[in-house]
Amino acid sequence: MRTIFWENGIRLIDQTKLPEKEEYIHCKKVEELIDAIKRLAIRGAPALEAAGAYGVALACFERDFKSLEEIRNHLIFEAEKIANTRPTAVNLSVGVQRVLKKALNGSSIEEIRKFALEEAEIVAKEDLNRNKKIGKNGAKLLKDGDTVLTHCNAGRLATVDWGTALGVVRSAIEEGKNIKVFACETRPLNQGSRLTCYELMKDGIDVTLITDSAVGIVMRKGLVNKVIVGADRIVRDGVFNKIGTYTLAINAKFHGIPFYVAAPKSTFDLQKRSEEVLIEERCKDELLFCGTKLLAPKETRIYNPAFDFTPINLVSAIITEEEILFYPINF
Amino acid sequence: MRTIFWENGIRLIDQTKLPEKEEYIHCKKVEELIDAIKRLAIRGAPALEAAGAYGVALACFERDFKSLEEIRNHLIFEAEKIANTRPTAVNLSVGVQRVLKKALNGSSIEEIRKFALEEAEIVAKEDLNRNKKIGKNGAKLLKDGDTVLTHCNAGRLATVDWGTALGVVRSAIEEGKNIKVFACETRPLNQGSRLTCYELMKDGIDVTLITDSAVGIVMRKGLVNKVIVGADRIVRDGVFNKIGTYTLAINAKFHGIPFYVAAPKSTFDLQKRSEEVLIEERCKDELLFCGTKLLAPKETRIYNPAFDFTPINLVSAIITEEEILFYPINF
């Protein structure tokens, strides 16, 4: 199962339909990709890196161009639109910039198209390879019999394949270790229940679903002994990740449970500090409705940040494709 | 708006229908009441105390009895059934026992009925009075301009009226203080969004809804400066309350934010320690579905405790109708 690939345009699994339906979307226009990213049909920082990369390639093919200047201007314009679709995960913009830079080296419309698509395919392939390396590195931190608590979905569906946090679990299991998972449902969009449970069960990995607020009790009862999450952006002073990660990290600290972040180096944005990063706020309907069910009075004021920030001193280690950075982490 | 009252049987607002419909259930049989308690049509420790009390009264009227012995045996039998409907909140059983004891003093069928109903009405009336006292005591802890974070629903709908945690907010506002509220949605059954937002907005109290996992970020950003929750059972070493309370208390401790529990003395069960109390686990459908929407693969293993335990050293104060017990609390 590959989350995103190129086949006469971009094909991506529609994650809003999971777990009920396994359905692919076919994007032939950049607008369709942007819509898919906004609706979270594709999400997860590394998957967005590939989406950004393929998105620039798509811009090369979405219409006929009369001149080199026209395609170049179009690419620059579309690249910025794609990169700004979601502000918090840095990887989207990393993927966009990388393919844009390569494509602009082309000296003909055909060469620009060729360069863009080739580079996008490399970005996607690299993601799979680096996830396998993250998995291998991270597996060293897991012992036979461990139970890992994870938040949101940092698995196959958040990447091109294999996953970051869940890639670590997969690699440890591949090495013959018996590893179980507890998954937080991850409100308001339930990526934990809809995506993490789905992909782990598909692989026959033992997973138990809990509400986000049950992290305290499962730690206190000793039902989990490690936490591994992904990341949307790692800055000098800490980690941006799905809302709830910080709440979870505080609970891990309180219980003396290691709190690991698994992410590719492209997630690092070490020129920045946390106060310079915008936390995306999403629409109130995400909390007002679940499917068609109304959960609160329609006029309710809602604060719905999609991410939170975990200070670096709460992080026991960051697992990358190159190395493991251990606490205390000084970049 | 009264949550539960007697009018030719028990009338109670069906909280599973809120916020969409304000609908009362009319229980003429104990079985109907038990079903309403199980479905959480009525919930909240103090409201369950009244429900238990009225339930024993209802048992007196649900059929004709031929002898004093018959009604007494029936009451004893039904009382136990009602009290065992939910195991964690102590108040249900307190209400049941109180009316049962009084009723059994009756020397005729008529007198038993009269005693039972009178005592149940006293229990209900006392709840309102003690909530007003809890409110008045707790209001001393709130300053003009405070924003209170609360979890689940410890308001009018969790009591006969006024509320415990939200009663404190109401009393402080009544005294002229400007108090705002942040409400955790409280998964899996969303009592925070469905009930707390509903009843506060109905009273014109400023409330903002967040996901349970956002407690960390709202504390870090200084959006709240006090936490007040209710309680289902207070034992020598801590507090049982809605799942997520412990996770929240750890976050409050980490951020140096006072964590208050507001509850009537009937919630105290000081002969017991935490290990003697059963935490109710509820069915997996609560996490699998939201309305008709499927949130996880149907075969997903789920751990769904309805409550958690917060050790007493995380509690800054317990507000009762008699007094405020301050940290460090030694009963």
Image (spheres, coloured by chain):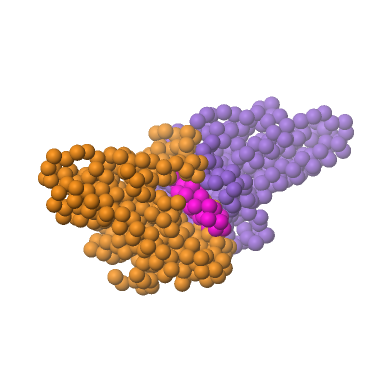
Chain colours: A orange, B purple
Q: Quadrant of the C terminus of chain B?
A: bottom right
The answer to whether any part of residue B210 appears in the image is yes
Residue A170, image x, y percentages:
49, 62
Report the residue that reaches farthest toward the top: B8
Q: Tell whether B46 sits left or right of A37.
A: right
Q: How many marks?
A: 0
Q: In this orientation, does residue B205 appear?
A: no
Membership of A198 in magenta stretch: yes
- Residue, x 79% and y 39% (percent of image)? B75
In the image, A102 versus B286, the foreground residue is A102
Percent x, y for residue A19?
50, 44
Residue B312 picture quarter:
bottom right
Determine the residue positioned at 13% across, 39% down.
A66
Say which residue appears at 61% left-offset and 40% top-offset. B40
In this view, the residue in front, B252 or A47, is A47
* In the rendered image, the vertical position of residue B56 relative to residue A166, given as above or below: above
Position of residue A289 measured from the top left corner of the image (x, y, whole percent): 45, 37
Could you say where residue A108 lies in the image, as x and y percent from the top left? 15, 49
In the image, taking residue B164 as reference, residue A76 lies left or right, namely left
Task: Identify the residue shown where x is 53% and y is 59%.
Answer: A181
A282 or A183, nearer to the observer: A183
Q: Is residue B119 magenta?
A: no
Q: Is residue A215 left or right of residue A231?
A: right
Q: Which residues are magenta?
A: A182-208
Q: Is residue A161 above or below residue B130?
A: below
